[in-house]
């Protein structure tokens, strides 16, 4: 073969290789995003109005100091959600369904009771937050907006599906990335930001510890445990695996997909958390506004980006996250009760097919709505709902770790050593923080 022919052949091979690489790259990206499901939705629902309020209160009160909690909580929340997802995939049942078959009834219903108490309070807080933001924009009393949002969300859950809600309202949550843009516009002290991100700072005061418990509670929430496992079961049902026998078991490839899904969802959830704290620290805290009591005050953090449109941006973000988060809260409660009582129930059914399931959804929404008429300040209720989640989460995390570490339940897919360590550490840290908070009061 002549030198010219060799060069031509080499050029053709290089061009073919480049074309294959260029074709393969978009396919890999497309495949990656197409495989995202329950984990990503869970991550989006995690940044609900309660989360936004808690992070805003945190940044305003303590500045950059709590930024380290975003890095700290990421592996903890990822591990717990991963265990819940694996439990649903391997057993073919939701968390309450597995509990019903392996633990005494008092443990089952105690776990469900903890979940329902936390979820009802969280629903009330999120409805109140959405209403307060709408009042800020329109001047219409929040007590009028609250039942409007409750009826809207309930109607959508009853007559459409949560998947449809996600398709429509997930775009509103993209407004939260305004916090990322604002963080760069206000020119924070990046050296202090980096230091606060990597060096933990703890203050031994009841206010700081309550904030720390709130941060953990809104990122590692009981309702997300039940939701993650139940949604993995729903994904299996979508594939035509309608019976537990057909769903039971999981391949290594399926578990790897779930792990990528969960880690991606938790990463985006914590990214938003990080920048809300950073932005409110660089704007509100830097200007001496350390106490947030109203939606207007929380919205002021976005003024450097949006000017007079800050209130609109804040309202759209809060409504979007509420429309995603509240159905998850009500749905998680309904899945738990239905599985515990062995009822038929799924958000993919229409109400006539799962009457008891939808009765729980309706009752949770009604109780949450009623909380808003007790005269509790909306911003305080949003913050303290996160704290309540932080207090109630540890015993449920212990149950999740025990279930997913059992060979009888999980077979060869029991927790790895690192998952066990992270699971037990999460329960211990959250319990210790809650106890310390009460001791310091």
Image (cartoon, rainbow, N blue to C red):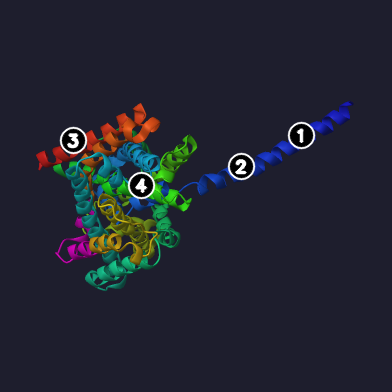
Identify the element where label 3 is drawn: helix
Q: Is residue 413 left or right of residue 384?
A: right
Q: Quick check: can you spot residue 26?
A: yes
Which residue lies under the disc numbered 4? 228
Numbered mark located on residue 13 in the image: 1
- Name the quadrant of the C terminus: top left
- Name the quadrant of the N terminus: top right
Q: Position of residue 369 (x, y in %)?
A: 22, 65
Classed neighbour count for the residue bearing mark 4: other residues with Cα under 10 Å, few (<14), some (14–19), many (≥20)? many
Identify the element where label 4 is drawn: helix
Q: Is residue 40 left or right of residue 440?
A: right
Which residue lies under the disc numbered 2? 25
How far apart are the alpha carbons under marks 3 and 1? 62 Å
Q: Earlier in the sequence, mark 3 or mark 1?
A: 1
Asked whether disc 1 touches disc 4, contact meaning CB atoms under 8 Å apart, the reply is no
Q: Quick check: can you spot residue 279?
A: no
Classed neighbour count for the residue bearing mark 2: other residues with Cα under 10 Å, few (<14), some (14–19), many (≥20)? few
Q: Is residue 108 left or right of residue 241?
A: left
Q: Position of residue 329 (x, y in %)?
A: 29, 55
How far apart are the alpha carbons under marks 3 and 2? 46 Å
Q: Earlier in the sequence, mark 2 or mark 4?
A: 2
Tell me the residue at 75%/38% (across/down).
15
Q: Nearer the viewer, mark 3 or mark 4?
A: 4
Asked whether disc 3 touches disc 4, contact meaning CB atoms under 8 Å apart, the reply is no
Which residue lies under the disc numbered 3? 432
Q: Nearer the viewer, mark 2 or mark 4?
A: 4
Asked whether disc 2 touches disc 4, contact meaning CB atoms under 8 Å apart, the reply is no
How far apart are the alpha carbons under marks 1 and 2? 18 Å
Q: Position of residue 100 (x, y in %)?
A: 25, 44
Q: Which residues make up the magenta segment?
A: 366-385
**Residue closest to the eye, 117 or 355:** 355
How far apart are the alpha carbons under marks 3 and 4? 25 Å
């Amino acid at each position: 073969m002549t030198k010219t022919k060799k060069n031509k052949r080499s050029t053709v091979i290089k061009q073919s290789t480049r074309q294959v690489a260029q074709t393969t790259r978009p396919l890999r990206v497309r495949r990656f995003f197409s495989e995202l499901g329950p984990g990503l939705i869970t991550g989006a629902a995690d940044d609900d109005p309660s989360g936004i309020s808690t992070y805003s209160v945190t940044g305003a009160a303590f500045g950059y100091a709590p930024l380290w909690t975003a890095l700290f909580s990421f592996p903890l929340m990822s591990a717990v959600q991963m265990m819940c997802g694996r439990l649903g995939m391997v057993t073919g049942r939701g968390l309450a369904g597995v509990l019903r078959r392996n633990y005494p009834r008092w443990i089952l219903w105690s776990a469900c009771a903890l979940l329902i108490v936390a979820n009802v309070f969280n629903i009330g807080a999120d409805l109140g937050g959405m209403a307060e933001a709408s009042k800020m924009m329109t001047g219409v009393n929040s007590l009028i907006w609250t039942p409007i949002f409750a009826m809207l969300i309930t109607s959508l859950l009853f007559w459409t599906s949560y998947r449809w809600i996600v398709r429509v309202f997930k775009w509103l949550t993209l407004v939260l990335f305004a916090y990322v843009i604002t963080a760069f516009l206000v020119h924070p002290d990046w050296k202090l930001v980096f230091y606060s991100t990597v060096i933990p700072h703890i203050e031994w005061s009841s206010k700081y510890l309550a904030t720390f418990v709130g941060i953990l509670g809104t990122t590692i929430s009981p309702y997300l445990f039940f939701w993650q496992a139940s949604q993995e079961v729903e994904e299996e049902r979508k594939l035509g695996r309608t019976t537990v026998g057909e769903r039971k078991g999981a391949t290594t490839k399926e578990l790897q997909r779930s792990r990528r899904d969960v880690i991606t969802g938790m990463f985006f959830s914590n990214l938003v958390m990080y920048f809300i704290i950073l932005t409110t620290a660089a704007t509100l805290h830097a200007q001496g506004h350390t106490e947030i009591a109203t939606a207007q005050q929380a919205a002021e953090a976005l003024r450097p980006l949006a000017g007079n449109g800050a209130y609109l941006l804040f309202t759209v973000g809060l409504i979007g996250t509420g429309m995603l988060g509240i159905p998850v809260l009500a749905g998680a409660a309904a899945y738990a009760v239905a599985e515990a009582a062995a009822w038929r129930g799924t958000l993919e059914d229409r109400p006539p097919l799962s009457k008891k399931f939808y009765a729980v959804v309706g009752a949770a929404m009604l109780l949450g709505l009623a909380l808003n008429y007790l005269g509790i300040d909306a911003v305080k209720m949003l913050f303290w709902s996160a704290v309540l989640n932080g207090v109630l989460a540890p015993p449920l995390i212990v149950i999740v770790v025990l279930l997913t570490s059992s060979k009888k339940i999980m077979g060869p897919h029991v927790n790895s050593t690192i998952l066990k360590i992270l699971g037990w550490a999460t329960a211990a840290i959250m319990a210790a923080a809650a106890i310390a908070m009460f001791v310091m009061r």
